[in-house]
Amino acid sequence: MKKVLIAYFSHEGEAYVGGKIVKLKIGNTRVAAQMIHGLTGGDVFRIETEKPYPDEHMENVELAKSEQYAKARPVLKADALKMDDYDTVILGYPKLVGRYADDRLQFFGKL
């Protein structure tokens, strides 16, 4: 049987949803990761930054813009995973300021 890893980065707190700002207890990408886990039975791994993002939506947007402009790469918490243990890796991450959070791909360099 193939072994699946579901690695995701998600943000709880204020988010722009359906034309308004709402407070999310669980981030959208986390919800998607849980749904994929239900379908695949894969291992779930949360990608986290050393410094959490702000809960307030506009503060978060401004920080994300400044990181993108500076091509900054937030420091990720280093957790040990053995990629050789997995046949398939599913990576989930949100769009930040209209762009995909491709800086989270550095996650693969941590493994």
Image (cartoon, grey):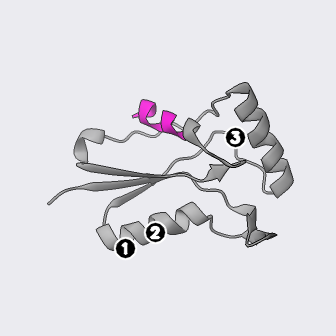
Q: Give the magenta-colored segment's residue range.
A: 104-111
Q: Secondary structure at mark 1?
A: helix
Mark with earlier residue (1, 3) = 1
Mark with earlier residue (3, 2) = 2
Q: Nearer the viewer, residue 110 or 104?
A: 104
Calculate the distance from the C-alpha at mark 3 to the C-alpha at mark 2: 24 Å
Question: Residue at coordinates 65% horizontally, 57% vertically from top-left?
Answer: 11
Q: Nearer the viewer, mark 1 or mark 3?
A: 1
Question: Are the residues tagged 1 and 2 within 8 Å (C-beta)?
Answer: yes
Calculate the distance from the C-alpha at mark 1 to the C-alpha at mark 3: 30 Å
Horizontally, residue 109 falls left or right of residue 77, namely left
Q: Alpha-carbon neighbours of circle 2 within 10 Å: few (<14), some, or many (≥20)?
A: some
Mark 1: amino acid:
Gly
Mark 3: amino acid:
Lys
Q: Which residue is mark 1?
A: 38
Our reading of the magenta stretch's main secondary structure is helix
Which mark is on residue 87? Answer: none
Question: Residue at coordinates 79% horizontally, 70% vertically from top-left?
Answer: 19
Q: Secondary structure at mark 3?
A: loop
Counting from the top left corner in percent of width and height, residue 26 is at 63, 68
Is residue 104 shown above or below 40? above
Horizontally, residue 24 falls left or right of residue 34, namely right
Q: Is residue 56 magenta?
A: no
Q: Is residue 107 magenta?
A: yes
Horizontally, residue 84 falls left or right of residue 1, namely right
Q: Which residue is mark 2?
A: 34
Is residue 27 shown above or below 60? below
Q: Nearer the viewer, residue 2 or 82?
A: 2
